[in-house]
Amino acid sequence: MPIKICVFDAYGTLFDVAAAARTAAQEDGFDILQENWPKLAEIWRLKQLQYTWLRAVSDAHTDFWEVTQNGLDYALEALGLEQNTALRERLLQLYWELGAYPEVPQMLTDLKSQGFKSAILSNGSPEMLAGAVDSAQITEHLDAVLSVQSVGIFKPSKRVYDLVGEHFHSAPDTVLFVSSNGWDAAAAAGYGFHTVWVNRAGDPIDRLPWVPKHILSDLTGISNLASTIL
């Protein structure tokens, strides 16, 4: 009997990428973020993703940490905060300590109790992912943490999705892939995975050749959905 696998994108799916800006805005010395931290978080995340796509298509791969810093530097300058080196340093520190969304630990516990293997497949570097997993205290729930660094290209390259089958010796149709990025869930569907888009913001579906097979507003229904699909 084939193993059943649930694979999760990391940033924005398991880990709250807005937490760094939100936390900094509540700390002494960073009052300037109290009103515009959501905008900073939004621009930072958008540029981080855009830089991964541009580097992928231009064959200019780099460590995800560099991309993360580049995205933050753009966001800070866009808001006129590029001279605030203390803020930049604090935001980058907090990015290594991102917490998981509240439903994540119980969701992963439920999957394990139902016999599923759980893994992360992420653009993040191994070091960044290890820090996030440890900070969120979910290490014991995961069977693998897979990084694009081993293939030298960012999502949505098929070489990234290949990592799941190579690690678990599994076929795509034994995998439920979960991402908060609609384009990621769509590309994974085109690859052959069962897919879930966690659409917390209620965004429209991206106009791509493929669409996510399932859409949820958060992760609470993943274990029930997985048991009906796989």
Image (cartoon, helix red, strand yellow):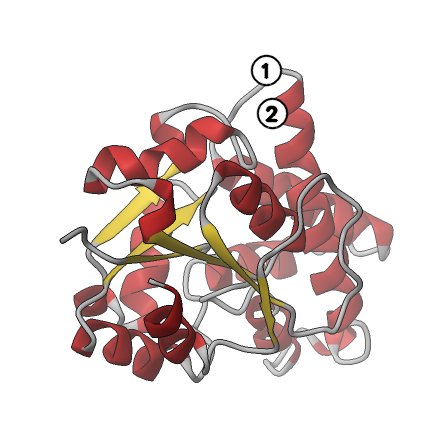
- At x 46%, y 81%, the residue is 221
How many badges with numbers are in the image? 2
Determine which residue is flagged by label 2. Answer: 56
Q: Which mark is residue 186?
A: none
In the rendered view, would you say 60 is above or below 32? above
Q: Which image quadrant: the C terminus? A: bottom left
Determine which residue is flagged by label 1. Answer: 59
The spot of residue 64 in percent (x, y) is 50, 38
- At x 25%, y 58%, the residue is 4
Closest to the observer, 111 or 4: 4
Question: Does residue 162 appear left or right of residue 170 in this picture?
Answer: right
Question: Does residue 174 appear left or right of residue 58 in this picture?
Answer: left
Give the amino acid type for the residue marked by disc 2 in the picture.
Ala
- At x 58%, y 59%, the residue is 213
Give the amino acid type for the residue marked by disc 1 in the picture.
Asp
How crowded is the residue under tag 2: few (<14 C-alpha within 10 Å), some, or many (20+)?
Answer: some
Quadrant for residue 45, please give it: bottom right
